[in-house]
Image (spheres, rainbow, N blue to C red):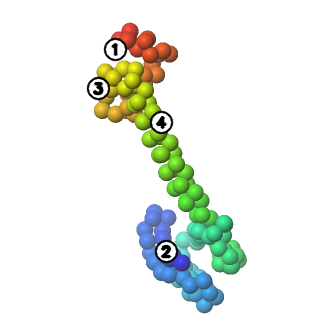
């Protein structure tokens, strides 16, 4: 697995690969402790593991008294974001089609159906015909 040692501000201090075996774990702890001592910072380890922590390394990190963060949720959040973007595209496309059918002239005053000012305009009144009486 690929590892990186970083600062709280995001600066990368060290980067290396880790084999999933005891000798590699020892090297991992040594490298992280070296950086922690050098910079005088407490250690937090972010670990991505299948279905939670990556045993036995997670237990060894906790035994050191280090803070352990599960970053497995990043994939979940990335997938959820993609799903929301796709849903947004579907809604915008449906709204474009509906507006094109009902009032094609309205689409000419905006560059995009999902402009915030345009959405505010469309929701300024309860019914569509009330928009015709709307004045600045």
Q: Secondary structure at mark 3?
A: loop
Instruction: Establish if 47 lies above or below 136.
Output: below
Identify residue for label 1.
Answer: 136
- Residue 11 location, x and y as percent? 43, 68
Instruction: Establish if 84 lies above or below 126.
Output: below
Q: Earlier in the sequence, mark 1 or mark 2?
A: 2
Q: Secondary structure at mark 4?
A: helix
Identify residue for label 3.
Answer: 108
Q: Earlier in the sequence, mark 2 or mark 4?
A: 2
Instruction: Establish if 86 lies above or below 54.
Output: above
Q: Which residue is drawn at the image coordinates 40% and 31% (left, top)?
A: 96
Identify residue for label 4.
Answer: 91
- Residue 127 location, x and y as percent? 48, 15
Label 3 vs label 2, nearer the camera: 3
Q: Are marks 2 and 4 in contact (CB under 8 Å)?
A: no
On screen, residue 59 versus residue 135, left or right, reads right
Q: Secondary structure at mark 2?
A: strand
Calculate the distance from the C-alpha at mark 1 to the C-alpha at mark 3. Answer: 18 Å
* Residue 65 visible, this orientation: no
Q: Nearer the viewer, residue 113 or 38?
A: 113
Identify residue for label 2.
Answer: 4
Calculate the distance from the C-alpha at mark 1 to the C-alpha at mark 2. Answer: 56 Å
Calculate the distance from the C-alpha at mark 1 to the C-alpha at mark 4. Answer: 28 Å
On screen, residue 46 versus residue 115, left or right, reads right
* Residue 4 visible, this orientation: yes
Q: Earlier in the sequence, mark 1 or mark 4?
A: 4
Q: Nearer the viewer, residue 136 or 111?
A: 111
Q: Earlier in the sequence, mark 3 or mark 2?
A: 2
């Amino acid at each position: 697995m690929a590892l990186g040692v970083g600062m709280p501000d995001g600066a990368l201090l060290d980067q290396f690969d880790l084999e999933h075996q005891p000798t590699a774990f020892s090297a991992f702890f040594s490298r992280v402790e070296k950086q922690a001592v050098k910079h005088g910072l407490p250690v937090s380890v972010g670990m991505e593991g299948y279905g939670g922590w990556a045993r036995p390394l997670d237990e060894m990190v906790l035994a050191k008294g280090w803070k352990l963060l599960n970053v497995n949720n990043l994939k979940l959040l990335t997938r959820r974001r993609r799903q929301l973007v796709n849903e947004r595209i579907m809604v915008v496309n449906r709204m474009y089609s509906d507006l094109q059918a009902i009032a094609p002239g309205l689409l000419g005053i905006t560059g995009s159906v999902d402009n915030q000012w345009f959405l505010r305009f469309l929701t300024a009144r309860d019914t569509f015909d009330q928009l015709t009486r709307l004045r600045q």
